[in-house]
Image (cartoon, rainbow, N blue to C red):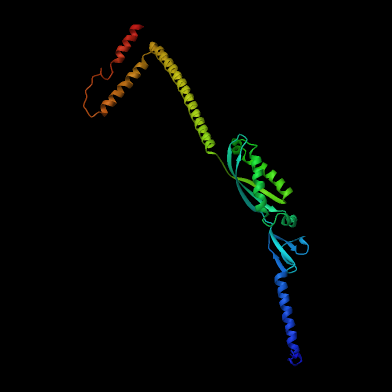
Amino acid sequence: MDFRRMPKVPPGMTSLARVLLGAAGAGYIAYNGLFNVQGGNKAVVFSRYSGVKPQIYGEGTHFCVPWLERPQIFDVRTRPKKLRSISGTKDLQMVDIEMRVLYKPNSTRLPLIWSRFGTDYDDRILPSIISETLKAAIAQFDAAQLITKREEVSKLVRRNLTERAARDFHILIEDVAITHLSFGREYTKAIEDKQVAQQEAERAKFLVQRALQEKKAMVIQAQGEARAAELIGHSLEKDSSYLELKRLEAAKEIANNVARSNNQVYLTSDSLLLNLLDDTTSTLKSKK
């Protein structure tokens, strides 16, 4: 085959091919060589030549060599992690407890975190250290203290967890809270029985106190009635006006009852107690 007889490519076509080739290369580099870091994120670059680079990229657009380098985006915002565990208390009671932990990675240690633990570092590390720290803290308290000293338990877990997570795994713990706490069926029933017994004891105590107060009231009333009778007796020896007053009150009450009755009743003065004063007055005069 004689290549000399082939038609020559026009000079303009060669220039156009170079432009197209250059544009394709620029587009490939722009598409694969630029990466964006969104707000609340940071990036670390892995190089096929040197491994994970120590440089940390903040928010914005950055350049990396296509194929040779690969960026990895990390979320450095605070996130929640919940864990439920069954632990034993100091008095050997089993407690079902759920804890919520707010955490985020140490942004200055992202290359080390990626190299040692990977991008799913939170799922690999947090469940184990949270469970271990929680069990160690719960074992220092009785079952009753977990209810009365709930905030103290949370502070203890937070202090121990913060120290270990930051020292060994470069994870920052911002808050720890106990969201659920329940005991075994036997212990719960024992608490309910204790509450019922305390309520019954308080009720019995109240009944005793009330009986004592009623007894004192009856004694005071009896003393008052005896004193009143004594005073009435002394007054009657001197004057019968009090007895007359009582007679009039009794007669008035009898008259009112008769007036309200539907039957017609005819009563004498003896029935209305209107003659008592004469007898009583004569009796008192005879005594004098």
Q: Hey, which quadrant is residue 155 in on the image? A: top right
Image coords of residue 161 (percent x, y): 69, 45
Is 204 placed left or right of 55 in the picture? left
Q: Hey, which quadrant is residue 221 in on the image? A: top left
Image coords of residue 162 (percent x, y): 70, 46
Q: Mark yes or no: residue 5 visible.
A: yes
- Seen in the picture, residue 56 relative to 66 is either above or below; the reply is above
Is 30 placed left or right of 187 in the picture? right
Viewer-nearest residue: 227 or 247: 227
Image coords of residue 266 (percent x, y): 21, 23
Q: Mark yes or no: residue 152 visible.
A: no
Q: Quadrant of the C terminus?
A: top left
Q: Quadrant of the N terminus?
A: bottom right
- Seen in the picture, residue 226 relative to 1 is either above or below; the reply is above
Is 214 placed left or right of 53 in the picture? left
**Residue at position x 44%, y 15% from top?**
227
